[in-house]
Image: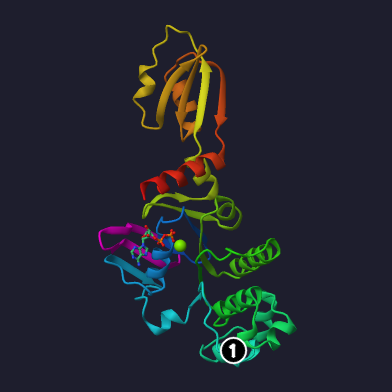
Amino acid sequence: MNEILRLTKVTKSFQHKKAVNEVSFTIGKGEVVAILGPNGAGKTTTISIILGLLKPSAGEVTLFNHQPHEKRVREKIGTMLQEVSVMPGLKVREILELIRSYYPMPLAMEELIKLTGLTEQDLKTRAEKLSGGQKRRLSFALALAGNPELIIFDEPTVGMDITARNRFWQTVRMLAAQGKTVIFSTHYLQEADDAADRILLFKDGSIVADGTPEQIKARITKQSVSFMVNPEMSLVALYQHSEIDDIYRKNNRVYVQTTNTDKVLELIFQEKLGAYDIKIERGKLEEAFEQLTSETKEAI
Ligand SMILES: Nc1ncnc2c1ncn2[C@@H]1O[C@H](COP(=O)(O)OP(=O)(O)O)[C@@H](O)[C@H]1O
Ligand SMILES: [Mg+2]
């Protein structure tokens, strides 16, 4: 793996609260990674630390095998901040020309316009006269101006309408296809599922799961394997296995709750239970995620 980013046991405390708690992960070139979690999970804090805007209380961050503050590192990173502070008096095109001039290898103006959907009208508008949508397009263009290798977005689609959102994700996919690395945060499971090829699931400042959207979905969804079996048959052998969360009987059926149904099927045969009429049921994904979200809210 061509390593772009490494966090090692990164912790950030505010007064007594640990906003981020011993978080470790690495991200390789070309990955599109979602930092997914409910409000308060520690997404913004983590991103701020990666961007060098916050100093971790403990732990280490390396970007491109260097410290986050080094200039040669900064030049390779693009980000879209929640609030764009634009330069009044300048037109959008002038702002972009100016920012591009700060970078050693900026993205061509035409490419920048094409990627971000800036219109002729946008380019002629003065900073202080920009509408919300125009500001967001400018902010996206500013993120890409330096032709960054790593692009980091904190909840980028908040406040975007469906058209802007689709366009944004289309561009992200184009950037990924060019080999760019993209990290974004979201509290929408659907968005992480649609846009990312890897999800870091955050809860209360810790990573509770790290995997492909498929793996994460399987992980948070309650699944069960149920089967019929001779009532005399002892199920004690099943309890020994760590993959099994719970076992109960209902209407003569045995239900085994698990995050790994494949493994349970294997165990059922391995233990020679004589199970028959085996069924696999998967709980509702949104429900599982809502549950995760509300648990966190209660904890605050
Ligand atoms: N500057 C700060 N001072 C005190 N607490 C903070 C500060 N920034 C964040 N927090 C707390 O840290 C936790 C994580 O916040 P944040 O990283 O913003 O979460 P997210 O972006 O996932 O919603 C929250 O409980 C938040 O209240
Ligand atoms: Mg946030």
Q: Residue furthest right?
A: 120
- Which percent across, then down, holds residue 248? 44, 19
* Residue drawn at (68%, 61%) of the image: 162
Which secondary structure dominates the residues rendered in magenta? Answer: strand
- Which percent across, then down, holds residue 247? 42, 22
The quarter of the picture where the N terminus appears is bottom left
From the Cβ of disc 1, is ligand 2 less than 8 Å away?
no
Question: Which residue was labeled with disc 1?
Answer: 95
Does residue 266 belong to the magenta stretch?
no
Q: How is colour applied across the structure in the image?
A: rainbow
In this rendering, position of residue 49 left or right of residue 97: left
Binning the other alpha carbons within 10 Å of mark 1 as few (below 14), some (14 to 19) or many (20 upward) gives many
- Which percent across, then down, holds residue 140? 59, 75
Q: Residue furthest top?
A: 232
In this rendering, position of residue 63 left or right of residue 32: left
* Residue drawn at (49%, 34%) of the image: 222
Asked which quadrant contains residue 71, the reply is bottom left
> How many circles with numbers are drawn on the protein?
1
From what the image shows, is residue 264 above or below residue 200? above
Residue type at mark 1 is Ile
* Residue drawn at (40%, 30%) of the image: 245
Does residue 11 belong to the magenta stretch?
yes
Under circle 1, the secondary element is: helix
- Which percent across, then down, holds residue 157? 59, 64
135, 244: nearer the viewer: 135
Asked which quadrant contains residue 93, the reply is bottom right
From what the image shows, is residue 126 above or below residue 46? below
User: What is the magenta range?
Assistant: 1-25
* Residue drawn at (46%, 28%) of the image: 257
